Image (cartoon, rainbow, N blue to C red):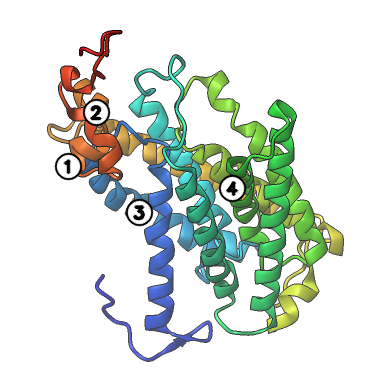
Amino acid sequence: AFFMMIDNNVYVGLFEICYAFYQNMFAAITPALIFGAAAERLRLIPCIVFIFLWTTLSYDFIAYWTWAPNGWLNVRGNLDFAGGTPVHISSGFAALAYSIVLGRRKGLGTEEFKPHSLNSVVLGTALLWFGWFGFNGGSAFKGNARAGMACIVTNIAASVGGLVWMTLDFRHQRKFSAFGFCNGVVAGLVCITPASGFVSPWASVIFGAFAGVICHFAIYIKNFAKFDDALDVFAIHGIGGITGCVLTGIFAQKWIAALDGTIIQGGWVDGHFVQIGWQIAGAVSGAAWSFTISLILLVVLNFIPGLRLRLDEDMEEMGVDMSQIGELAHHHVNEKSFLPPSINEPETVLDDGKV
């Protein structure tokens, strides 16, 4: 805690303080992914408590298994370059637990829920796409050929994922959906994350294509299972992360890892057929641990006075922005929502010009 016992020693080519800071960014962004599933109905104080407990009891364990020299997955040869299991699978299955415990949004199924700003969706996707080069390329911990290759395959998988998802959406209305493209980009980024330092550019096309197709249809799981994952975190991060981990066991290659001197046995394409077994083991164990810990934490928190997870009905109707934060994203648009009904109603002009 507080970076104690860290000095100027070098670990994986970095000073320990730099490595610790970089890993802190992974630990910070992972729980943030979870709460997209609970949008429009969560209370913030229980959410903050959950972040601390979940990061300590779920993320830290899975990250240790995956990346620590003595972590059981790392020792067994599981390949996860930049966080397919610790970041995406863990957050996706925690989001599933959060969705189940919170319940469905009021009006879901009878009202249409859409993003309030497509501009924000596109801008956010662009920022994510750019930041992912640091996420995946940075996991090489050096500015070397392997880092460059990780960035190349990341970009290809994202592009292919976006195009595939947009094509699948095209079949509905014969229109090219920017929203669909953004979903596919994120799915491609998620899927390539565990493989980014192990696969070649031609394989990244397959990762993007599989991510676009599998995550697109995984979204429909929530309709059959009747849970409310508002931003499809489970489908894109949970299922997308599992897809990427399994595909890594097939397409990992020795020569990619050897770009910075790392020695691996590769995946199926290198004749190492047992690798996919360890990839599945890592994905399943990470998913099971995260879902179980999340479910226990959420159920317990929900029974503690003052830590009830969900907003009251009137607060939910008002919206999380106003009820929990007291500020609106777009005040000039939303302010009418909080005026008395008589003020909101437009004036009626009669034929003689009188109001």
Q: Earlier in the sequence, mark 3 or mark 1?
A: 3
- Separation of residues labelled 2 and 1 (CA atoms): 14 Å
106 w.r.t. 245: above or below:
above
- In the image, which disc is placed on residue 312? none
* For the residues bearing labels 3 and 1, Cβ distance under 8 angstroms: no
- Separation of residues labelled 2 and 3 (CA atoms): 37 Å
* For the residues bearing labels 3 and 4, Cβ distance under 8 angstroms: no
**Label 1 belongs to which residue?**
326
Q: Amino acid at mark 2?
A: Ser
- Separation of residues labelled 4 and 1 (CA atoms): 30 Å
Q: Which element is circle 3 on?
A: helix
**Label 4 belongs to which residue?**
182
Which quarter of the rendering shows the N terminus? Answer: bottom left
**Label 2 belongs to which residue?**
337
What residue lies at 67% left-to-right and 51% top-to-bottom?
244
**Label 3 belongs to which residue?**
55
Q: Earlier in the sequence, mark 4 or mark 1?
A: 4
